[in-house]
Amino acid sequence: MLNWIWLGLIIVAVLYGGWHGTLVPGPDPAVQPGVTNAIGDYARSAVNLVIGLVGFMVFWLGVMQVAFDGGLRTVIARLIAPVTNRLFPDVPADHPAMGAMVMNMSSNILGMGNAATPFGLKAMKELARINRVPGVASDPMVLFLAINTSAITLLPPLGTIAIRLAAGSSDPFSIWIPTLIATTCSTVGAVAAFFALRRLPVFATPSPSLSRAPEASEGDETASLADDAPEEPPRDWDRVRSLLTCGVLVALFVVMGRDLASVAEGGTAGLIQRVAQAWLVPLLLLSLLLYGFAKGVDVYESAIVGAREGLDVAVRIVPYLVIILAAIGMLRASGAIDAGAALIDPYTRAVGVPAEVLPMALLRPLSGSGSFAIMNDIITAHGPDSFIGQLTSTLMGSTETTFYVLAVYLGAAGVRSGRHVLLACLAGDLCGFVGAVTACHWWFG
């Protein structure tokens, strides 16, 4: 799908630019930069974008690694296990598929999509082992993928925030709460669509021609939650570490209380605003680091390991961003985007959706790197703190790259018929879009 989209962007840019005379710069290059010049300009901006991403991604992924090494992912996995047991009654609680699904979901909840992927692939392979109709997605497979592509994200979307920071946003973390609301709507919508669609005869699971018993699974570290759990610290573990953690927490609350007291005259609304603007990020940072520290993690060494992953991620996305951003730049320079936006703007604005954000909404289910490129382009054109910039940033974190995830995960499980999985996932994407628009209007006014 992305092959057609990328090629289509270039074809439309060249044909539209040739028809309207925008292939070369006009008298004012700032107004008409020219399609040919846009290739080099946007390719350079893609590289500069990655350079701006590196520092932020390296630092925050390092911080997340500290909490992960302390066992935070396992704690969240155990908290959501009762829910997953009810959602997947056909999967035994002690089956490796259940352990892998829980670890995948907990990683997504923490915003660590890269860490979630190996668990997700393992879960699909294990679900295929207990699937009585080979090649056809079972109910647990469909529901798992619906949740996976619309996962609620509790922590800030670090990649999006890094783009906003590089674009000069005065409050890059402002999209955190709207994104949480949007992902919640996305997940609820996807799960509801799964239960509604599976009742239709057209999506019913075909009867197996030959019933087969569940096969034994390969054992590995994701086979159970207990295998991933950190070792219990000895009874006489370093008390100094515990005392230091408690001391820092006490000092933090004292300082925070003093700061909030200075804005107490603003009432509850003023306190909430102060916490959201000044304290959410510092609290998140210290909470993750102190959790790992209290669990005996060597925080510096652990952060270095996570930081290396952040550097690897930044390097890997360079070719994707350059290729897609150059095509988008050509299309924008040709004038086709502005013409299309002007055509549908009266209709979309009537429901509170600026036409400028529609390219993000359409490409987000198809390509993560392409969405990043479009988001950067929109933010550069309209500003990161404009409503269009805020909504675009929120849309970036509202759903996953649905088509990519389905292709990879269904392929890993050898599934040829996904039944209603695509419709369920697209329903989640739609609910995420509606949730993002509603949350941004409520949060940003």
Image (cartoon, rainbow, N blue to C red):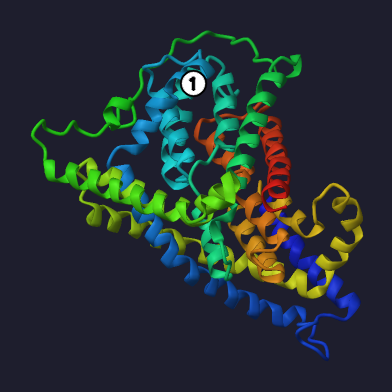
Q: Residue furthest left?
A: 236
How many numbered discs sit on the rendered protein? 1
Q: Where is mark 1, residue-wise? A: 83
Question: Which amino acid, by three-letter code, is at mark 1?
Answer: Val
Name the residue at 60% across, 31% down.
Answer: 146
Name the residue at 61% across, 30% down.
Answer: 416
Dividing the picture into quadrants, the one containing residue 125 is top left
Residue 182 makes an appearance in the image: yes
Q: Residue furthest front?
A: 265
Residue 315 makes an appearance in the image: no
Q: Is residue 148 left or right of residue 243?
A: right
Which one is nearer the viewer's eye here, 398 or 18?
A: 398
Using the image, determine if residue 88 lies above or below residue 325.
Answer: above
Using the image, determine if residue 78 lies above or below residue 408.
Answer: above
Q: Is residue 161 left or right of residue 333?
A: left
Name the spot of residue 418 as percent of width and height, x first: 64, 28
Name the residue at 52% across, 55% down.
Answer: 263
Using the image, determine if residue 34 lies above or below residue 370.
Answer: below
Q: Is residue 272 left or right of residue 221?
A: right
Which one is nearer the viewer's eye here, 300 or 147?
A: 300
Name the spot of residue 89 as percent of width and height, x first: 50, 13
Which one is nearer the viewer's eye here, 441 or 123?
A: 441
Name the residue at 59% across, 24% down.
Answer: 137
Answer few, some or many: residues within 10 Å of disc 1's Cα (few below 14, many 20 plus, some between 14 and 19): few
Dividing the picture into quadrants, the one containing residue 417 is top right
Name the spot of residue 321 as percent of width and height, x first: 58, 65
Which one is nearer the viewer's eye here, 18 or 93?
A: 93
Name the spot of residue 76 as percent of width and height, x first: 40, 32
**Circle 1 sits in a helix, a strand or a loop, which is it?**
helix
